[in-house]
Image (cartoon, rainbow, N blue to C red):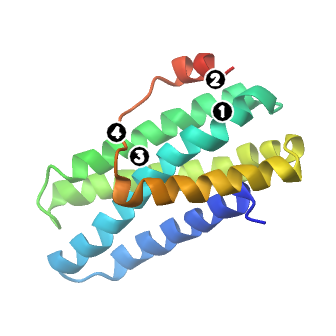
Amino acid sequence: MDDITALILDDHAAFRRGFARLDDARDPAELLAVWEALALHLDIHAEAEEAILYPHLVRHGDDGAEETEDAIGDHNKIRDAVAESKLHEVGSDAWWAAVWRARRENSEHLAEEEDEALPDFRRHASVELRAELGQRWLAFYGEHKNGRNLPFRDKDPEQYVQDHR
């Protein structure tokens, strides 16, 4: 069984490793190779959570609406920093500022999600639902390989919550 929460945590570990790889990269080509893959994964992950996890949490969690609204806002900040990085020369001060903003926002988001949203979801979701959503998660990544057909646009957090209640 592929539990959606375990799959999300796998992505979180990959993000931490990706940012650590940036610390070790020494030239623009290496920075670009690491960042392009990591930035794309961050964007796809946010879209996957917004399509699969958060519609359930907003309706069933103890603090689901608040956690969901916060998460959508976090995703927007991460998306914005990723988009900003693409406007600058790799390795430049402006590029690094955007990448570091993405890193900070992502680190805060992962901690909140791991300490609040995912435990809340686990308390209210059956093992069967977690497995079903895990299957949907894997299918989502397959259907949107390399971000195919995903808009990577910010969402209004309050509107998202209203739309999914």
Q: Earlier in the sequence, mark 4 or mark 1?
A: 1
The numbered dot on residue 55 is 1
Q: Position of residue 47 (x, y in %)?
A: 48, 44
What residue is disc 3 on?
Answer: 78
**Residue found 28% across the figure and 65% down from its top:** 36
Q: Earlier in the sequence, mark 1 or mark 3?
A: 1
Q: Answer few, some or many: residues within 10 Å of disc 4's Cα (few below 14, many 20 plus, some between 14 and 19).
A: few
Q: Earlier in the sequence, mark 3 or mark 2?
A: 3
Q: Say what amino acid the circle numbered 2 marks.
A: His
The numbered dot on residue 37 is none
Left or right: 29 with respect to 102?
A: left
What residue is disc 2 on?
Answer: 164
Q: Which one is in front in this view, the residue at disc 1 or the one at disc 3?
A: 1
Q: Answer few, some or many: residues within 10 Å of disc 2's Cα (few below 14, many 20 plus, some between 14 and 19).
A: some
Q: Mark 2 and mark 1: span between their CA atoms?
A: 5 Å
In this view of the protein, which residue sits in the foreground, 7 or 34? 7
Q: Mark 4 and mark 3: span between their CA atoms?
A: 14 Å
Q: Quadrant location of residue 94?
A: bottom left
What residue is disc 4 on?
Answer: 151
Are discs 4 and 2 less than 8 Å apart at CB? no
Q: Mark 1 and mark 3: span between their CA atoms?
A: 20 Å
Q: Position of residue 124 (x, y in %)?
A: 87, 40
Q: Earlier in the sequence, mark 2 or mark 1?
A: 1
